């Protein structure tokens, strides 16, 4: 991403005052997001700090996931193409994208591809089956025979704390001889019960993270399963999901986690995809699920701060610092009175850029 020459300086100065949330813009702020060139940095969340014991936990490298794309495990040809997809996170799929009679083949293919394919530059993730399916133990047992294990694990349909606990027990058993292995974990909220229990689940996940079992890094909103669970009808504007969609991102951000937005299922409707992606970014989501290569660039651009937005943030932070040094109070910037929430929004943008630059994305 092309940024201003003084951006790095401003980013370093703001690090001592990290904002608590990824806020949305208010009146007078330039458009939140606009299309950017491929490879541009993504939205992120503030650094995690919970206790002295969690130093290794919150110091893990930031992994961008603007685009989280599913690749069916039973299709070897598609698995081999992952490095060329241009996605931030490639999900080698064992769950909903794989028929029941192809689960065994998918497991073996994924195990093989983990060792054979160079996933450098891509967050190589595996989505196992849910605890409630009774298939996750076999997923872990087979896939984790690979010499190179996935960087990230995605656990679907986490409705209760017990679901997370059972998965954690299985993961620890399978990786008992891999003492240095501590994957990133993303959990799914896909039901009314999952929404209600989300806070308790993340509290427990945070405890496991501090213990070094895994590194809890994000939450994915499974909108289609959620609609089925509550009996809602999917619409193009997703109004039926408004409450759950906002609740998921709010709770995720309370725990300083990434939040991955819903799937857009019409792969030919690029304009509606763009609108929904921008809407999700404005709500605070850090990325979106992708089901087709044709969706990647639209989603990536929507979750990338534009050059105009970065310039606005850089100039606002600099102006605020100048007024602080001169002993002046409130001031105007681009014709608008500046208050602390607006300053925090600007700092958030610069923190996002720093996180992505440090990740090498």
Image (tube, helix red, strand yellow):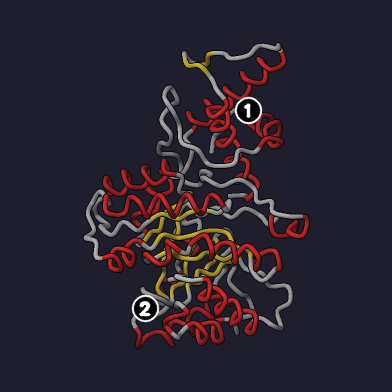
Query: Would you place residue 310 above or below residue 182 in this image?
Result: above
Q: Position of residue 254 (x, y in %)?
A: 55, 50
Kindly indicate the quadrant of the structure image that contains residue 263.
bottom left
Q: Which residue is mark 2?
A: 98
> Is residue 309 in sight in this rendering?
yes
Relative placement, left or right, of 259 versus 210 is left
Q: Residue at x 67, y 71 (%)?
A: 213
Is 232 displayed left or right of 52 in the figure? left
Separation of disc 2 and disc 1 at Cα?
A: 47 Å
* Residue nearer the viewer, 191 or 321: 191
Q: Residues within 10 Å of mark 1 (few under 14, many from 20)?
A: few
Left or right, 80 with respect to 62, comes to: left
Sort mark 2 into few (<14), some (14-19) or many (20+) by Cα contacts within 10 Å. Answer: some
- Depth check, front residue: 310 or 343: 343
| Residue 5 badge | 1
Q: Nearer the viewer, mark 2 or mark 1?
A: 2
x then y, percent, for residue 352: 57, 41
> From what the image shows, is residue 141 above or below residue 330?
below
| As drawn, 341 above or below 206 | above
Residue drawn at (48%, 15%) of the image: 334
Numbered circles on residues, count? 2
- Residue 168's mark? none
Residue 76 visible, this orientation: no
Look at the numbered disc 2 and give the secondary structure of its residue. Answer: loop
- Kindly give the residue lying farthest to the right in the view shown: 52
Tell me the residue at 51%/45% (across/down): 43
Q: Position of residue 222 (x, y in %)?
A: 38, 63
Image quadrant in which you'd find residue 267: bottom left
For label 1, the SS is loop
Which label's residue is closer to the chain start, 2 or 1?
1
Q: For the residues labelled 2 and 1, say whether their Cβ atoms are less than 8 Å apart.
A: no
Write the residue at 34% across / 81% down. Answer: 99
């Amino acid at each position: 991403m092309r940024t201003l020459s003084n951006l790095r300086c401003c980013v370093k100065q703001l690090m001592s005052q990290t904002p608590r949330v990824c806020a949305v813009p208010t009146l007078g702020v330039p458009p939140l997001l606009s299309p950017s060139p491929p490879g541009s940095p993504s939205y992120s969340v503030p650094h995690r700090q919970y206790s002295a014991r969690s130093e290794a936990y919150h110091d893990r490298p930031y992994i961008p996931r603007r685009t989280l794309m599913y690749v069916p495990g039973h299709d070897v040809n598609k698995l081999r193409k992952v490095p060329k997809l241009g996605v931030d996170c490639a999900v080698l799929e064992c769950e909903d994208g794989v028929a029941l009679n192809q689960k065994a083949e998918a497991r073996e293919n994924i195990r093989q591809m983990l060792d054979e394919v160079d996933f450098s530059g891509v967050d190589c993730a595996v989505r196992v089956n849910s605890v409630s399916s009774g298939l996750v133990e076999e997923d872990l047992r087979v896939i984790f025979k690979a010499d190179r294990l996935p960087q990230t694990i995605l656990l679907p349909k986490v409705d209760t704390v017990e679901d997370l606990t059972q998965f954690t027990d299985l993961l620890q058993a399978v990786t008992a001889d891999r003492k240095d292995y501590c994957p990133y974990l993303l959990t799914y909220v896909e039901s009314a019960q999952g929404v209600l229990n989300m806070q308790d689940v993340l509290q427990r996940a945070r405890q496991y993270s501090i213990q070094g079992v895994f590194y809890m890094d994000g939450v994915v909103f499974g909108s289609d399963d959620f609609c089925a669970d509550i009996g809602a009808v999917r619409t193009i504007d997703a109004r039926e999901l408004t409450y759950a969609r906002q609740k998921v991102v709010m709770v995720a951000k309370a725990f300083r986690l990434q939040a991955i937005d819903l799937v857009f299922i019409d792969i030919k409707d690029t304009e509606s995809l763009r609108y929904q992606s921008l809407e999700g970014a404005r709500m605070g989501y850090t990325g979106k699920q992708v089901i087709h290569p044709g969706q990647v660039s639209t989603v990536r651009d929507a979750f990338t701060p534009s050059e105009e937005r970065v310039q606005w943030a850089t100039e606002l932070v600099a102006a605020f610092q100048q007024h602080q040094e001169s002993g002046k109070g409130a001031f105007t910037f681009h014709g608008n009175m500046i208050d602390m929430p607006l300053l925090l929004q600007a700092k958030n943008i610069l923190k996002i850029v720093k996180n992505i630059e440090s990740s090498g994305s």
